[in-house]
Image: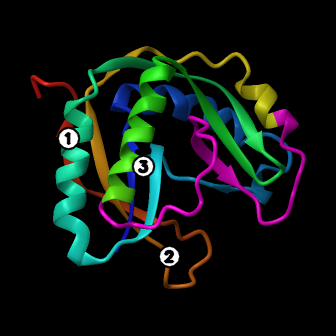
Amino acid sequence: MRLFAAVLPPARAVDELACAVRELAELPGADRLRWTGREGWHLTLAFLGEVDDAVLDELRDRLRRAARRTEPFALRLHGGGRFDGRALWAGVAGGLDELRLLAERADAAARRSGIPMDQHRRYVPHLTLARSRAPIDLGPYVGGLASFEGSRWRVAELALIRSSLPHTGVPGERPRYEAVARWPLGRDG
């Protein structure tokens, strides 16, 4: 199954961001972007790819330990950015050191479980809002997010998410995400 480790923002943070995204979706050219669905908004910590069932128990145990070793921390969605001209994202502020540490621990848990983590890149905390097949000027959208300041929330759990890619070929179909496991952060969790 195709998996990734993530932090899921609470409904209040998603609602706040959705208001800002509604305005972005009205900008000229917004119809050229494939907008992500708010039901799938998340902060990816480590993309694991296709994971063999044989390693799932060990992976779950290692992710549980990673969560336990990380104390809860505060985050908020803040501003935005882009990757080239192909992906628009909302940024994150607050406990970035703690978020990066949790991402490192999730990556290490996967590696130690035998999952090849070949695509290791510098971790950039973000929540993907839209993608484009061809590069386009995302400057107006990033500018539209510049003043966005979401409310703080307490990150209290690590989630293991199953990603099911679209398979029907219906235009606009989005990946489906399902939390297959969740672990509370901190020793008291």
Distance between mark 1 and mark 2 Cα atoms: 32 Å
What residue sits 86% from the left and 44% below the top? 28
Quadrant in the picture for the N terminus? bottom left
Q: Which mark is residue 107?
A: 3
Question: Where are the magenta residues, as a range?
Answer: 113-140
State the image coordinates of residue 90 (x, y, percent, origin top left).
62, 33
Query: Disc 2 versus disc 3: distance between alpha carbons?
Result: 26 Å
Label 2 amino acid?
Pro
Instruction: Look at mark 1 in the image and give the residue it sits on.
Output: 65
Q: Secondary structure at mark 2?
A: loop
Q: Residue at x 19, y 32 (%)?
A: 68
Q: State which mark lies toward you, 1 or 2.
A: 1
In magenta segment, residue 154: no
Looking at this view, name the residue that lies furthest to the right. Answer: 137
The x and y percentages for residue 73 are 34, 18
Q: Which residue is mark 2?
A: 166
Give the dominant element type of the magenta stretch: helix, strand or loop. Answer: loop
Residue 119: image quadrant is bottom right
The numbered mark at residue 55 is none
Relative to 151, is 88 on the left or the right?
right
Along the horizontal axis of the image, is 30 left or right of 154? right
Q: Report the number of discs.
A: 3
Residue type, numbered disc 3:
Asp
178 left or right, relative to 77: left
Q: What element does badge 1 sit on?
A: helix
Which amino acid type is marked by label 1? Arg
Q: Earlier in the sequence, mark 2 or mark 3?
A: 3
Q: How is the image coloured?
A: rainbow
Characterize the local packing of mark 3: few (<14), some (14-19) or many (20 or more) Cα atoms within 10 angstroms. many
In three-dimensional space, the C-alpha distance between marks 3 and 1, rounded to whole angstroms, equals: 13 Å
